[in-house]
Image: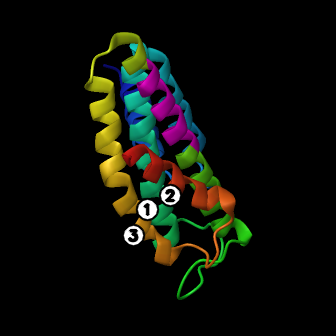
Amino acid sequence: MSGGALASFVASVGVGLASTRSLPGQPFYGLKRATEGLQLDFAAGDTAKGAKHLEFAKTRLREVQALSDGSGLLSLGPAQVGGVVASGSRGGHIIDTLKDFDSETRDGQTLLEKAYRASGQTAPLTVLKSCASTQPVRLNALRPTLPPRPPPPAAAPLRRVARARQ
């Protein structure tokens, strides 16, 4: 392998790795989301696509946690000691990421329920039940770091996951 090819390979791997660890507002975050889109495109069937959506929902929660506690932030605006206010870029990124979490959860739930209705197999429901049993714990752990009165888009994921548990 030539020196130029090796340098290109190392740079590509570095960018790929950076994108997987990116948070909303960081330079490689768009690449991370594009990669997730490709993963959905290549997932075979509604069960696999639904599971991917729920995996990405879990990723969105990790991003909210990192945004709210300040870990992994490059420069997304000033941090507020004692919590995050839902204004400014950091609070806006948190709210947007919660909306994305809600969307991923809704899409995953819809596909998994569709797969169950079409096949009668319980595997899609098992995936959904697993998510519904772990997500409320994660969401409730985030509550103290969220704005004091989250707007409806931030509260909606809590209600959606609670309904999926039933």
For label 3, the residue is 141
**Frontmost residue, 10 versus 37:** 37
Q: Residues within 10 Å of mark 2 (few under 14, many from 20)?
A: some
Give the CA distance from mark 2 to mark 1: 7 Å
Query: Which of pointers 2 and 1 indicates the residue nearer the eye?
Result: 2
For label 2, the residue is 158
- Mark closer to the chain start, 2 or 1: 1
For label 1, the residue is 139
- At mark 3, the secondary structure is helix
Q: Which mark is residue 115?
A: none
Name the residue rendered at 37%, 22% in the picture. 48
Whether pointer 2 and pointer 1 mark residues with C-beta atoms closer than 8 Å, the reply is yes
Chief secondary structure of the magenta span? helix
- At mark 2, the secondary structure is helix
Q: Position of residue 135 (x, y in %)?
A: 38, 53
**Left or right: 9 with respect to 40?**
left
Name the residue rendered at 32%, 15% in the picture. 120
Question: Mark 1: which amino acid?
Answer: Leu
Q: Residues within 10 Å of mark 3 (few under 14, many from 20)?
A: few
Give the CA distance from mark 3 to mark 1: 5 Å
Name the residue rendered at 35%, 11% in the picture. 119
- Mark closer to the chain start, 2 or 3: 3
Question: Mark 3: which amino acid?
Answer: Ala
Whether pointer 3 and pointer 1 mark residues with C-beta atoms closer than 8 Å, the reply is yes
Position of residue 99 relative to residue 130, above or below, is below
Question: Mark 2: which amino acid?
Answer: Leu
The outermost residue toward the bottom is 81
Whether residue 127 appears in magenta in the rendering, the answer is: no
The outermost residue toward the front is 166
Q: Which residues are magenta?
A: 103-114
Residue 40, visible in the rendered structure: yes
Position of residue 134 relative to residue 2, above or below, is below
